[in-house]
Each structure stands twice: as C-alpha cells, then as structure tokens.
Amino acid sequence: MIRITTVPMALRYLLPGQMNFMAGHGLDVLMISADGKELGDVIEKEKCRHIIVPMTRKITPWQDVKCLWQLIKIFKKEKPGIVHTHTPKAGLLGMVAARICGVECRIHTVAGLPLMVEKGSKYMLLKFIEKITYAMATNVWPNSESMKRFITEHKLCNPAKLSIIGKGSTNGVNINRFNQKNFDEKILESIKAEINYSTENKYLLCIGRLVVDKGITELVNVFTQLQKDNADLILILTGEFENELDPLPKSTLQEIRFNPSIIHINWTNYVEYYMYLSNIFIFPSHREGFPNVLLQAGAMQLPVICSRIAGNVDIVTDNKTGLIFDCGNEQQLLQQIKYALEQPIQMQRMAKQLQTEVKENYTQEVIWQKILEAYKNLVN
C-alpha cells in the first residue's frame, strides 16, 4: 500500500500510528509526501519507508506536472495493490497517477473541502479538481456523514463510490495519550510556568492554524469584548500563522501579539496538557472534515463550544455534548461563552457525555481495525 499526503505534517498529526499499525498487520506500507520538518519524526515513529515528492499546497501547475510524473514512475516501480491519498493536492496527483498506472484499488479520504468557503472562479476551479480526483478514485471515503452529504448534494462524486469508516474520523483518538492519569509531571509543570498558570484565572483554549478559515478573527473579537467584564479570562491560541495562504487581518494580528491576556503558542506536541489546564475549548472553524481536536477535547472531558459546520456537528450535539453556534456569528459565540463561564456544572455534564461517546466510537484501535477490514474487502 502507498499512503500519500501533500506534506509530512498530515502524516505526523492527522494520521499518527496508522501506517505502523497497517505494517504490523501484513501490509507493505510506503509513505509519500513533500519534505518538511516533521519527516524525520514520521519515519521514526511509523517505521515505514518514505519517498519525497515535492508537492505544494498552492496551485502550481508546472510543479504539479513534475510531481505527477514522479508519482507515475514510483507506482510503476512499486506496483502497489492500494494507493490511498489524503489532502487535496495529494488526492488529485495520487489518484490521476494511480489511474494511469492501472492500480486497481484507488482510495481518497476527504477530510475537508477548501471549496466550502470559496466563491467565484476559485470555487469553480476547486470543484473541478475535486470532481477529477473522485472520478479517478475507485473509492471515496468522506470522514463524516455531513461531508458525505455535502459531496452528494453538490454532485461531486458517484454516490456508489462513497462510504464512511465506522461513524466517521480519519484516525480516531489516542485514549491513552489524552488521559491526565498518564501525564508527565515535569512537562505539566513546565507548561504551567510557560503560561504563568494560576487557578484564579479561567482559560479559553483554541487549537489550530491561525488563519481566517479557522474562525480566529471572530474568536479574538469576542474575547476582547469578554475581557471588559472578565479580568481573569485568558485566551490560549496554539498554532502557526499562515500569512501566505490565509492571512489574518492586521488588527487581529496586533491583538494577538500585544494583548497581555492572549497567549500564543506557535507549536506544541503537548496539546493534551493545555486541554487539561483549560476551562473551555473553543473551535470556531469555518470548514472541517471530522476534526481530531474535538475528539481529543472530548477524551479529556473538556467542555466544548464549536461552530455549526460539517464535521463539528457529527461529533458535538448542541446542549447535549457541547454548545454550537452559527459559523461566523460573533454574537452567538459571545453569548455561549458567557453561558459556559456562568454554568460550569452544566458544561461538565455535557463534557462527560461527549467523553463517553468518544470512548465508545472513536478510539484509534477501533478506527484502524475498520480501515484494515475495508482494505482487505476491497483487495479481495
């Protein structure tokens, strides 16, 4: 099996452990992605071969053609039984190359659609690219029911190709990692020192890239309003800026950099520790497939407030396992954070219910086993 993502970050943070699991259950796994800082860690942890193909996340026609040709040469040499792609660019190039080479089992996982937040000519281009990807695939796996529904309603794919693994998710959640009983006390104390942690404060946490698509602008605007009546409120943002692909407005950037009550953590491998120290998890994203961070927050029994979008609504049920607000609606987000701060017992009750559902349906071992079964059925 050849598993392809555009960049190694996806292998490292969206699919950790999955390739190693498949290799341990009889598959000869080859990973392909562009180069990147996460690559060494990926190879060490997954213990599978890796080939660099310099794919980009941007629209780069000449570079894309070169990468397509490189993939074709790899496929002809390796003769894979399965090619499984993840992320838009890897999906397009990987599925086209696999079709050209006659690979019988061509799977593309849909974990998010950039076109969902685009308009005009860019929307039409992205829609065309998705339709090509799905046409070249033999199987298309949306990672949530609402994502499958979107694809069907917009006639992007033959419905016969569509199926969902289990109840959704691309990789599930590592229950052992997201469990405070297994924490390293030294790491916990160092993170407390890093954020100057105090039990007198209340901490709002948001994890993800600091871009417009993740709803960071609305969150920062709402937080500055809440600050006026909540001097003990702290906002922790963990994630990198992407100023080339989706830059935040200048006013939002300045607020993040200069507001003493906003803590920006550029990158961390210890998100579970920040979840443990936080009071509420805020996820205001504009588009998702089936977000891992909501599963992780659920495993940590951290109360959740999220936007009403595909993916989020497949995990969180409003007023049962968390609170949901209309995407981009700052007034609703403001009111829900106020409610969460005033009703901590109610929020903990919902968080406990979410934790139960995550443990029952979304552990990594459950998801991995279902994917393995799907591979075997397709190959047979």
Image (cartoon, helix red, strand yellow):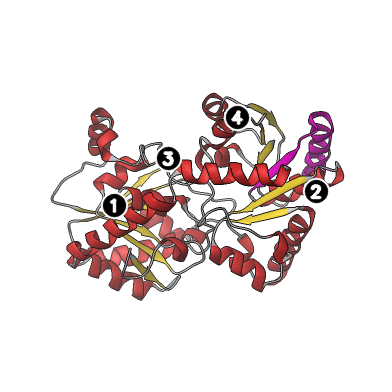
Q: Residue at x 76, y 48 (%)?
A: 95
**Earlier sequence position, callout 3 versus callout 4:** 4
Quadrant of res 112: bottom right
**Residue denoted by label 3:** 267
| Structural distance between the alpha carbons of marks 2 and 4 | 25 Å
Give the amino acid at mark 2.
Val
Q: Which residue is mark 2?
A: 96
Q: Residue at x 75, y 37 (%)?
A: 81
Q: First in sequence: mark 2 or mark 4? A: 4
Q: Find out whether residue 111 is within the magenta segment.
A: no
Count neighbours of disc 2 (C-alpha within 10 A) and say few if under 14, some if 14 to 19, many if 20 or more. Answer: many
Q: Which residues are magenta?
A: 61-86
Q: Amino acid at mark 1?
A: Gln
Marks 2,4: beta carbons within 8 A: no
x and y, in percent, of residue 145 in the image: 55, 64
Residue at (62% x, 40% y) in the render? 7
Of the numbered discs 2 and 3, the one sitting upstream in the chain is: 2
Instruction: Locate residue 82, reporting x and y percent.
Output: 72, 40
Q: Is residue 247 left or right of residue 193?
A: right
Q: Amino acid at mark 3?
A: Trp
Tell me the quadrant of the picture where the C terminus can be found. Answer: top right
Instruction: Give the residue number, with chain letter if any, for mark 4.
Output: 23
Q: Answer yes or no: do the residues labelled 1 and 2 have beta carbons within 8 Å?
A: no
Which residue in the structure is indicated by mark 1?
A: 301
